[in-house]
Every structure is written in structure tokens, then in C-alpha cells.
Image (cartoon, rainbow, N blue to C red):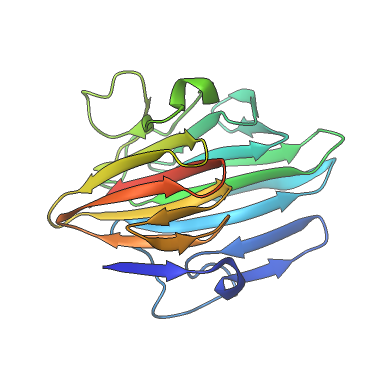
Amino acid sequence: MIDKRSFESLGGADHGWLKAKHHFSFADYHDPSRMGWGALRVWNDDEIAPNSGFPPHPHQNMEIITYVRSGAITHQDSMGNKGRTEAGDVQVMSAGSGVRHAEYNLEPETTRIFQIWILPREAGGQPSWGAKPFPKGDRSGRFVTLASGFAEDRDALPIRANARVLGATLKAGESVTHSVGDGRHAYLVPAVGAVTVDGDAVNARDGAALSGGRTVTITAVQDAEIVLVDSE
């Protein structure tokens, strides 16, 4: 079964410096039917104005993945980490027992990100942060694992959840498949372009919630960049 969530149906907020759309309940947006999908708790589609950003604030017991769609994000945290992550690249933060961080757009252009939160397999632990480039050419016509809680995914950024974050770029007419295991949950969003999922249209920034025990075929109607989370 595919539960499509059109971009127009998403919750959201406009703070001037931040225009946010929420695939699931977040902050002042509450929909009891959209509290998450498996271990995936938050998927925010954020547009951050130039020379602005999220000032220091705390988190704990959450795996936070930032997928940069355009522009760049500059990270600082209470562990002393600093880093700039550009479009197409990914950063992850395991909040663990507690961490404070800030995310700034120091660029002269709007930065667009997907901010994805996944529940960890267990609470606590030392917080950590990491970032890595993932060239879009390496994802051409196939899914690449960007972040993973499984040891065999050695090229992915590590997270502490029974989940994977995958990315693919497809040219119009190309297809990929993804198998959602029994009892697992997948959530797919095209960052750009349009696709069909087993024939159902999913446009840019729409969400598609996929239930377990099935293999889906994803076909690009237009050149597309896809992000998918597969979790418990």
C-alpha cells in the first residue's frame, strides 16, 4: 500500500527567515494521523534565507540527518565540531544523552534542506556528528546508502538506528526498485523531478509512505533526485 502525501497537504510554518513544510507532526503542526512512519519521526522540508539559521538549541535521543538540496549549511555544536555541508552532501548527528547545535546558512543564496529525524534503537550514549560528500553521479540510476545503522554499510555515515537513508538520481524513463522488508517502513520524497511508484504519481517534494513486505518500482517521469528512508 502507498500512502501519498502531497506537498500541498503538508503542515508548515513561515518564519520569514525559515519556510518549513512538515511531512509529520512537528512544532505547532499536529496531525494525529501523521506522527511518523515506523522509526521515522520527522521529515522537514526547510528553506533557510541567506545569513540566517537555527541558533544553538538542545537535542537528545534522536538521530538527525540533514540532506542538503541546494546551497550549504554550516554546523556548530557543543562537542566542538564545525563543518560546512554542500548541496547533495549529508551530515548526521546522534544526539545521544544530549547535545547543543546550531545550523546556519552563511551563503548569499537560500539553502534548502531535508531534515530527517529517526528514533534511535536505544536511548543515551555519547553524542556524535559527521558529514560526507555523496557525488550525485555515483547515485546515477541506483540507490546509494547515505546513512545507516548497519555495520555492513561501510561507506555510509553511521547512525544509531535500525534504518537506512538512501539516495538516487534518475534520468527520465529510468527505473529502480526497492524492497521493503516485512515489518519495515519506507518513506520516499523526490527532492526534484517527478516519479511514479508502482504507477502512482509522486511529484517533487511529495511524500510516499510504503508499507513492508513488498518490492516497489520507482520510475522517473522527469529527471529526479530521490531520498528514501527505510526503517523499523
Tell me which residue sits at (38%, 33%) in the image: 147
Where 144 sits versus 186, above or below? above
Picture quadrant where residue 35 is located: bottom left
> Residue at the spot x=29%, y=42% of the render?
177
Q: Residue at x 58, y 55 (%)?
A: 204
Q: Which residue is drawn at 55% across and 39% down?
A: 67
Picture quadrant where residue 187 is located: bottom left
The answer to which of 209 and 165 lies nearer the viewer is 209
Q: Where is 159 relative to 20, above or below?
A: above
Coordinates of residue 30 in the picture (x, y in percent):
51, 78
Could you say which is closer to the camera, residue 78 or residue 174?
A: 174
Lateral position of residue 133 relative to residue 150, left or right: right
Residue 35 horizontal side relative to residue 78, left or right: left
Vertical placement of residue 159 versus 14, above or below: above
**Residue located farthest toward the bottom when viewing the structure as drawn:** 32
Any part of residue 45 in sight? yes
Q: Can residue 59 be seen in this view?
A: no
- The number of numbered discs placed on residues in the rendered structure image is 0
Rendering coords of residue 169 (x, y %): 49, 34
Q: Which of 175 and 48 is in front in this view?
A: 175
In this rendering, the answer to whether 50 lies above or below 156 is below
Residue 52 locus on image (x, y percent): 81, 45
Q: Which residue lies furthest to the front in this view?
A: 173
Residue 60: x %, y % from top left: 43, 48
